[in-house]
Image (cartoon, grey):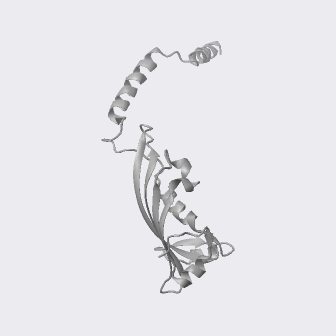
Amino acid sequence: MLSLLPDFADPVRLCALGKVYDGKVPLAELPRLAPLLTSTEGEAAFVLAFEVDADRRPVVRVKVSASLALQCQRCLGTLHQLVDAESRLVVVAGPDEAERLPDDVDPLLVSEGRLELRSLIEDELILAVPAAPSHSPADCAVSLTRVNRDESVEDRSVSEDTVHPFAALANWKSDSKNQD
């Protein structure tokens, strides 16, 4: 196993050679992931295993583990999400070849025979981030039952005291019917 990850490589060649890269990458060095995090401190452990499967297709197995600091969308506090993701990617030359793949693998489209290996790690981490991360209700600083109860009290008080801006139009409508 190799710990030094090259920036770019030919995945088909790496699969033919059976290369395996094992190591850690700082989260701060993953620029597409950084905006999704509240802190880029820490590292992601990875294993990139290149192989040829029984159908003689080049396959990349990606395993990534990390603890990501995300922002809870309910309380806006920091939420630590543990990620342990794994995927199996088959190197394809185009969309037609990707459509013929079985459901248990994902396509990895490679242009010009070059692939940024770090992007495989970053992609797995980005895919592991939930669309709206939030603490469990017991761990969150904001109680949904209290928020919902407070909003219903505010809604009643607003509806009783609110002047409706189009109320005068209702009078005009009734006046025009009386004149006809």
Residue displayed at 61% across by 67% down: 7
Residue sitting nearer the eye, 164 or 3: 3
Left or right of residue 180: residue 164: left
Q: Quadrant of residue 92?
A: bottom right
Q: Is residue 7 above or below residue 178?
A: below
User: Foreground: 172 or 73?
Assistant: 73
- Residue 84, position as x, y percentages in the image: 40, 62
- The relative height of residue 39 versus residue 18 in the rendered view (above or below) is above
Name, please, the residue furthest toward the right. Answer: 112
Residue at (56, 56) in percent of width and height: 29
Image quarter hosting the C terminus? top right
Pinpoint residue 38: horizontal percent, then vertical percent: 49, 44
Give the farthest residue toward the left: 138
Tell me what residue is drawn at x 42 percent, y 24 percent. 155
20 relative to 86, above or below: below
Residue 7 in view:
yes
Residue 99 lies, in percent from the top left, at: 57, 74
Front position in the image: 126 or 172: 126
Tally the marks: 0
Is 83 situated left or right of 94 in this image?
left
Q: Position of residue 8 (x, y in %)?
A: 63, 70
Q: Is residue 175 left or right of residue 102?
A: right
Q: Is residue 57 visible?
A: no
